Amino acid sequence: MKLYSYFRSSAAYRVRIVLNLKHISYDTIPVHLVRHGGEQNSAEYLDVNPQGLVPSLDITPTINTGERELKPQIITQSTAIIEYLEEAFPQPALLPINLIERAYIRTLMQIIACDIHPVNNLRVLHYLEECFDCDKAEKITWYHHWLATGFAAFERLLIENGSTHYCCHKQVTLADVYLIPQVYNALRFNLDMSPYPTINRIYQHCIQIPAFVDAAPEQQPDADI
């Protein structure tokens, strides 16, 4: 497998965690989202992912010589990639067996993936700057608002569920996979995390797990490029 990734992309970070938790070997193809006007906008990468976003996962089978034998099979959108990995590599399972618990995990996932991340990603922040003349302070205010709104709801759900070191019971689930990259970015942008003690506790626990450690932005091959 080949993962088209940017070390600071929280969506790519999620996928790296899942690949590591499931012990799936993959090669990283760096796509720098800032350098040269954004390598995601190149014609070469748009052939991989017409949206010009990361991550993209190339799952094309190869023959022994390493030459492709089939038309490229590329999955885009982090949630689609992660659902594919969960179904194709079911162990260890990252969703509970109980259907109600699965729905709860997906609720937490979607708070991150649908309500926080899309309005705070790099292209949105650039658009605010270019089209609405927002300065750095105004962009940070925007960023913090959507983080705080999402985290407040996330924290309340965790408390109601009795969460301790994981989002659900005593096992890593996809909710943790989505939460940790978002907290990493919140800390990077200096959000006050004191109102979210349960989120903090889960974050501090999960970032000690090898699969999460190895997926962290600073551990990626393109981190120093």
Image: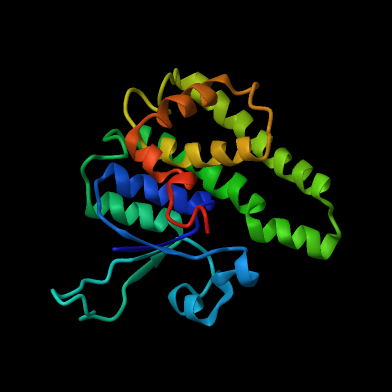
| Residue at horizontal 29 percent and vertical 33 percent from the top | 98
Q: Position of residue 200 (x, y in %)?
A: 53, 24
Q: Residue furthest front?
A: 224
User: Is 136 located above or below residue 192 in the figure?
Assistant: below
The picture quadrant where one finds residue 62 is bottom left
The picture quadrant where one finds residue 94 is top left
User: Is 171 located above or below residue 133 in the figure?
Assistant: above
Q: How many numbered circles are shown? A: 0
Q: Position of residue 19 (x, y in %)?
A: 31, 49
| Residue at horizontal 82 percent and vertical 65 percent from the top | 131
User: Is 187 located above or below residue 132 in the figure?
Assistant: above
User: Is 34 located above or below residue 20 in the figure?
Assistant: below
Q: Residue furthest left?
A: 64
Question: Can you say which quadrant of the picture contains the N terminus?
Answer: bottom left
Could you tell whether 184 is left or right of 13 in the image? right
Q: How is the image coloured?
A: rainbow
| Residue at horizontal 56 percent and vertical 71 percent from the top | 39
Could you tell whether 66 is left or right of 50 in the image? left
Could you tell whether 61 is left or right of 160 in the image? left
Q: Position of residue 129 (x, y in %)?
A: 79, 59
Q: Position of residue 116 (x, y in %)?
A: 61, 45
| Residue at horizontal 36 percent and vertical 32 percent from the top | 101
